[in-house]
Amino acid sequence: MEAIKLQRKYPQFSQEEVMGLVSKFRDMDIDGKGSITKQEAITALSSGSKPEGTYDSVRMTLKEVQVDSSGKIELDDYVDLIAKLRQGNNKTAGKVISSPSTGKSRVMVQGSNSNIQHGILPDELSAFTTHINGVLAGDPDIGKRLPLPTDNFQIFDEARDGLILCKLINDSVPDTIDERVLNKPSAKNRFKPINNFQMTENNNIVISSSKAIGCSIVNVGASDIIDGREHLILGLIWQIIRRGLLSKIDIKIHPELYRLLDEGETLDEFLRLPPDQILLRWFNYHLKAANWNRRVSNFSKDICDSENYTVLLNQLMPDYCSRAPLQQPNLEHRAEDVLQNAEKIGCRKFLTSKSIVAGNPKLNLAFVANLFNTYPGLEALEESERPVIEDFDAEGEREARVFTLWLNSLNVQPGVYNLFEDLKDGTIILQAFDKVIPGCVTWRRVSRPKEDQELSRFKCVENTNYAVELGQANRMTLVGVQGADIVDGTKTLVLGLVWQLMRKSVFATLASLSKGNREITDSDMIRWANDRVRAAGKKTSMRSFKDPSLREGIFYLDLLDAIKPGYVDYSLVYHGKDNEECTMNNKLAISIARKAGALIYVVPEDLVEVRPRLGLTFIAALMALAP
């Protein structure tokens, strides 16, 4: 009967063909529920001896099939999908298109509406997928799903449940996510996908954790990942990989970076450079040491002829990497020779010969960063040579990190890398004021630097004086603070100004959620937290944001369980008797908060050390989360 109905609906199929399709569908429907997953349908129809289409064409055509809210593929959907594929729908999906104007090859994907398309570079897709295959191979939760193909869009489907992205974040910045809170397929059926709600929770963790490690996440939500929005997911993957690659370019990890200072340059000036600029400095240091007459100022056109790469590799590892590629006249062949040299020292990653010649800046940056991390090639410093690195107090460093992330979450332009340096001309702090208190800045009063130019000190002081004026007008306590203090990078005063602005933002958000839109105080927050915990039958409490018992993390976990009953698995909670147990509890609390959708910038150490300002931001995030 079922086959007869389908044959009437899809007359292009013979009765025999319909019977064959029904039989194949039932073979896939192992549990007999009358449905299969989208991934099962895509895999079945794009593989085997007689595939209905490529992975990408099946994947794209499936988006045209009217699947119900469960997201499962029923028999009618399955036949409809095959009918559309045989009509030739999306036959070119995933095909590389070369642009006549730029010469670049891209795969075009659909944007948020039918009028928008986005281009994906195949070299980037392949490089990032290869990286994921390498660093996550053997993972107990997702290892069996790897390696993923590097020449199609399967990575975007595999990323939907959030697990691969969470694992990638932890590879780039270890211990960012407590993996105990992740939703995973059951032990009984590891191939049965988690449901949409569980995917959303995992992807809440992805988004919040990405922001917490410094990725710029604008207009990307959990639903975009679940929907497999290719250009957004690939952009997110790149930022996570980039963060991991650049994290070791730090003078505290590599004191020998001191050797890269230019003549007359102070250490303070050098430390203001972002990691990618330090990488270029490192590249040029070795080119100079090799008596080479060229230098690099970017990761694209200065590298695309492979000459500088040839000299760099030879300088780092002369026994393995010769300068023979310089004799090769063909650019693509020369690039391949360079990569073969890199392969000899275990550094053939991210690049292909074509992407070198094309001057892909992302892939070149990744290649050079990996090269630095593997073979920095800088002579260790003698004790007498070691620079005096001002070790700013721990509380100040931790606050600066959180405030930097918060400012970047406001989408200020340019992004903040060094809090004390980047606020000096006043333009970023004034943008932040305008975001927190919309309309408060009269922009005609503000001086802005021209492209590739800096403002004079006089103009910087004018801007920062205006910022202090705005703070005072909005009831911030800024006694003795002047614009010149911000320009001079006086750390305690910069932190004080940014903290008060962040606090105002936090409290404004909480006030908008409160009855009557009344202003919230610290005491209100403490009272609210204690009331919620007490009402849930818990015995913990807090006296203030300096309460030493907060270091154990148990109060935060009790508060989370009061807000989201059942979210905390107390079998994972320690007594908090030592530093390690306290750290594990606070790590768990942060990950659970992110899973519930809270935006958290603190790290476990901030809570273990009971940093009052940072503890307040954590409680505030939970308060905003509460019903």
Image (spheres, grey):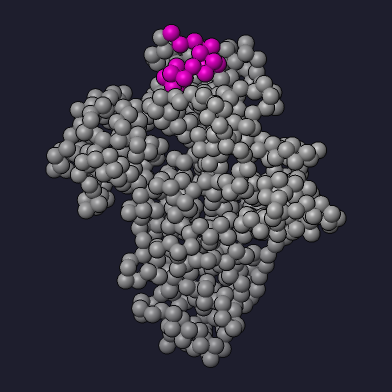
Q: Quadrant of residue 546?
A: top left
Q: Quadrant of residue 27?
A: bottom left
Q: Residue furthest bottom?
A: 16
Q: In front here: 615 or 299?
A: 299
In the image, taking residue 320 as reference, residue 329 lies left or right, namely right
Q: Residue at x 61, y 72 (%)?
A: 54
Q: Quadrant of residue 532?
A: top left
Q: Position of residue 88 (x, y in %)?
A: 65, 73
Q: Is residue 310 visible?
A: yes
Q: Position of residue 51 (x, y in %)?
A: 59, 79
In the image, taking residue 520 as reference, residue 454 lies left or right, namely right
Does 125 sit above or below residue 146?
Answer: above
Give the quadrant of the C terminus: top left
Does 335 sit above or below residue 60?
Answer: above
Q: In front here: 113 or 224?
A: 224
Asked if residue 441 is among those painted magenta in the image, a careful observer would answer: no
Q: Position of residue 191 (x, y in %)?
A: 40, 70
Q: In front here: 560 or 138?
A: 138
| Dominant secondary-structure state across the stretch colored magenta | helix
Does 258 sit above or below residue 178?
Answer: above
Does 244 sit above or below residue 624?
Answer: below
Q: Residue at x 65, y 18 (%)?
A: 455
Q: How many marks?
A: 0
Numbered range of the magenta stretch: 480-498
